[in-house]
Image (spheres, rainbow, N blue to C red):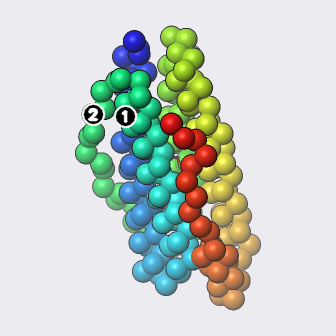
Amino acid sequence: MMNAKVHELLNQQINKELYSAYLYLDFSNYFKARGLDGFANWYMIQAQEERDHAMLFYTYLQNENQTVTLEAIAKPDKVFTCDMDVLKAGLEHEQYVTSLINDIYSAAYDVKDFRTMQFLDWFVKEQGEEETNANDLISKMELFGSDPKSLYMLNQELAARIYSAPSLVL
Ligand code: FEO
């Protein structure tokens, strides 16, 4: 029997991950309108990964015979005045998601729910990678963003990102 708080947090995380997908889709849309297709591609793949994350929480709860309740997904409402704002919003969002994963982990730890802790281990690692990626993108933008030729090259680099399914299979 899963603890009620752990169940609630896991269920909420489905919504948070779907919101993340929606947010990154919005970022992708921003860059598409800017004519920076590589950046748009990078965030489109990010959105796909977030949907995968949502599905992992969804499947985990179902596998554990727990109810899944889908709630409304919030509207991404940030207005950006420059490209760097988007990148920084991405890092901020990942730091927030890391705090959510940590909260679920902490709730599972409190009730000795070792199975949920093991499930969340993958996300703990993934969040480390997501924050690193967001930071790297900001660093590259700081170095190259102000020079049009370098920005073009960076855009080309980001265009090469390809989707791969999550390494965690449930
Ligand atoms: Fe699903 Fe980017 O955290």
Frontmost of labels 1 and 2 is: 2
> Dot 1: within a 10 Å radius of its alpha carbon, few (fewer than 14), some, or many (20 or more) residues?
some
> Dot 2: within a 10 Å radius of its alpha carbon, few (fewer than 14), some, or many (20 or more) residues?
few
Question: Where's residue 17, x and y in %?
Answer: 43, 45
Q: Earlier in the sequence, mark 1 or mark 2?
A: 1
Q: Which amino acid, mark 1?
A: Gln
Q: Is residue 12 left or right of 125 when viewed as pictured?
A: left
Q: Decide: marks 1, 2 in contact (CB < 8 A)?
A: no
Q: Is mark 1 on a helix, strand or loop?
A: helix
Q: Is mark 2 on a helix, strand or loop?
A: loop
The structure residue drawn at horizontal position 39% and vertical position 60%, both measured from the top left corner, is 78
Q: Quadrant of the N terminus?
A: top left
Q: In this view of the protein, can residue 78 be seen by the observer?
A: yes
Placement of 25 over or under 29, stated as above or below: above
The structure residue drawn at horizontal position 34% and vertical position 59%, both measured from the top left corner, is 77
Question: Where's residue 44, x and y in %?
Answer: 48, 66
Question: Where's residue 139, x and y in %?
Answer: 71, 64
Reading the image, the residue beneath label 2 is: 69
Q: Which amino acid, mark 2?
A: Thr
The part of the image, by quadrant, that contains residue 79 is bottom left
Reading the image, the residue beneath label 1 is: 12
The structure residue drawn at horizontal position 50% and vertical position 19%, both measured from the top left corner, is 107
